[in-house]
Image (cartoon, grey):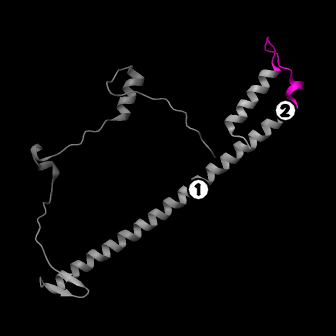
Amino acid sequence: MATLFEYNEKIDEIMAKATDEEGVIDYSLIEQELNAVNMERKEKIDNIISYVKSRKAMAEALKAEKMAIAKRQKTADNEAENLKKYLGIALKGEEWESTAGKVSYRKSEVVHIDDLDKIPDEYLTYKPEANKTAIKEAIKKDGEIIAGAWIEEKVNTQIK
């Protein structure tokens, strides 16, 4: 079975043979051959559509499975952290060592922020982020030229 591109080339060849210098097509000359090629092409297109749908369904199933596994991982991590805290409370700072493992402690410091608005600017960090909606509007409506930005028009294939 040929690829879609090969089918398109076959159709172009058939049409070129059946078209005279004035652009008149002799349909009786090509009807049977063109119909056979079109049937193969239609079958190929339908097969590709079915394959795309099955791959999308598989991707959705994998996404759901990934989310379920991530949830289970988070639960296991939380359980381990809670049990570590419990051991710290139960041992009251006492170090412990056995064949199962060793419990020890280290000090750390954590900064807590109660009100971000009260923090002076010198202690804040900002991540620059382009407002794509505003840029698009300025380019389209106002015809503004914005250095470093442009609009790309795309054609997205939809399969349902």
Q: Looking at the rendered structure, which numbered label has been put on residue 158?
A: none
Compared to 129, does 117 lie above or below?
below
10 Å crowding of disc 1: few (<14), some (14-19), many (20+) = few
Q: Secondary structure at mark 1?
A: helix
Of the image marks 2 and 1, the number of the one nearer the N terminus: 2
The image position of residue 79, as x and y in percent, is 31, 76
Compared to 129, does 17 lie above or below?
above
The image position of residue 80, as x and y in percent, is 29, 76
| Near-viewer residue (45 or 83) | 45
Q: Which residue is mark 1?
A: 57
The answer to which quarter of the image holds residue 3 is top right
Q: Is residue 103 left or right of residue 141?
A: left
Q: Amino acid at mark 1?
A: Ala
Q: Is residue 30 left or right of residue 160?
A: right
Q: Secondary structure at mark 2?
A: helix
Compared to 28, does 78 lie above or below?
below
The Cα–Cα distance between marks 2 and 1, rounded to whole angstroms, is: 37 Å
The image position of residue 16, as x and y in percent, is 77, 21
Q: Amino acid at mark 2?
A: Glu
The image position of residue 135, as x and y in percent, is 35, 29
Residue drawn at x 76%, y 26% is: 13
Q: Judge whether residue 144 is colored magenta.
A: no
Query: Range of the magenta residues?
Result: 18-31
Residue drawn at x 21%, y 78% is: 85
Q: Is residue 151 left or right of residue 53?
A: left
Q: Which residue is mark 2?
A: 33
10 Å crowding of disc 2: few (<14), some (14-19), many (20+) = few
